[in-house]
Amino acid sequence: MYRMLIVDDEPIIVNGLMQLFQGNPEFELDLCKAYSAAEALEIAKRTKLDILVSDIRMPGKTGLQLVDDIIYYWPTCRIIFLTGYSEFEYVYQALRKNVDNYILKTEGMDPIFEAVKQAIRKLEEENRQRLEQERAQLHLHLAEPYLKQEMMTELLKGEPLPSLIADERYADLSFTISADRPAYLVAGWVERAEPPKRKTLQAVQRIFGQLLPTSLACEQTICEEEAQVWLLQPDAELSARFGDTVGGGDAGEGVVAYLKGILEQVQNECEAALDTSVIFGISGNVAESWETAHSRLEAMLAGIRDRARLGHPLAIIDFGKAGALLWEGMGSGEDKEPEEQRGWLIEQVHRYVQDNLSGDLSLTTIAGEVHFNPSYLSRYYKQATGRNLLDYIQSIRLNAAIDLMLNTSLKLNDIAVRTGFDSNSYFTTFFKKMTGMSPMQYRNSHR
């Protein structure tokens, strides 16, 4: 499933495009929306993006300026511009930025649908080429330099990184991680790996390296012949974009959200190229206390094994987030029936939706709450319940809106906000589609 972000400073255009794409059976897209370039940039910092459909003229930062930021975070994102102006200078600048399409809003929906189809075809072709390259290299043996392996092993045993860097044995080693800047441990556990397992682990490492942006330094190792460990460090520019510093508090959450988007890509690629599932865990900033790297890794591996036993092959567990170990409440998984495990997880999803109706209920956000790959959560939910997660969210929002209309004196605008609609017109369109009546008609008919 590809993810598409629609950006325009006119809500009626954004909401209209959202509805048209949701109602078109030719598309299966995870849709996001923003009403400004600034809001779009915040989404890009925490969510993998495959396609951007953006107005070119917006207050503040323009669509042309937004593209530079989007491509920085997601270099393979395809770009489609919408505009009400047929101006040569805009077309020229768009072509210089390698934009896929430049469409006048007056041309209607058919050119927009066709442009998105072309973008999807390009993404699929790029994915196909990457998969072919990976399959061709699957049996190649790429050995890590011995001293780097040794240094990583010592670090993961509890030796502080500053001490290792100062050790004469590693004096000439080009270890890419600095001891005085934020860094994050990522552990990966491979499911369904056929013998020899080490070759599969190496293939996963290659995919990880191919999808890792140059803004992240990386050192890696295979731990105990069964788990992979990466140590990642944002460069100065990426850290500055997220305000991430040692002891930076909540600023590090932005980096972790960005890293989870990358891990989602890696999982999807491994599943397609290797028929292999990888469960990932990610730590908080280990540079705050290098001595804790060993204990953090042990806790991460234990939590990952628990999720594997529960049958969640595409989990992404944020161990710096409250609730990451909530799954211990399910036990080891060995004494629970599969239906009970599944029901417990679906209950967590439903509870989050019900408690956050007025907030962000995107697939990425909900998946983050239950530590799942967003695409996998979508499949898992449908298999478990027989319905799409979006359908459930819409039904809950509809029921909540009806309850507030019939049992309170709140204005319809306020009801729209409380049930997660950021414009009254979008709420009215949604409600009429679901019930056949406008909110005002429905309320009056039940008085």
Image (cartoon, rainbow, N blue to C red):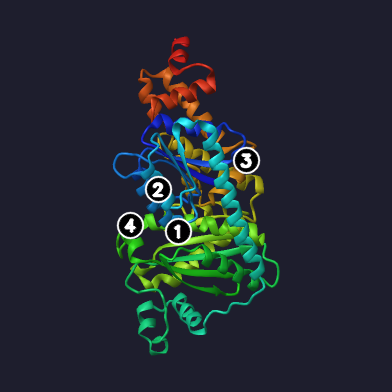
Q: In the rendered image, which residue does mark 2 sit on?
A: 92
Q: Earlier in the sequence, mark 4 or mark 1?
A: 4
Q: Amino acid at mark 4?
A: Arg
**Amino acid under disc 1:** Leu
Disc 3 target residue? 382
Expressed as whole percent of the image width and height from the top left, the position of residue 184 reads 42, 65
Q: Of marks 3 and 2, which one's residue comes earlier in the chain?
A: 2
Q: Nearer the viewer, mark 4 or mark 3?
A: 4
* Position of residue 274 in the picture relative to residue 18 (left or right): right
Mark 4 against mark 1, which lies toward the viewer?
A: 4
Q: Residue at x 61, y 68 (%)?
A: 203
The front one of 336 and 188 is 188
Is residue 14 shown above or below 286? above
Of the numbered discs 2 and 4, the one sitting upstream in the chain is 2
In this rendered view, identify the residue nearer to me: 243 or 38: 38
Q: What residue is pinned by disc 1?
A: 259
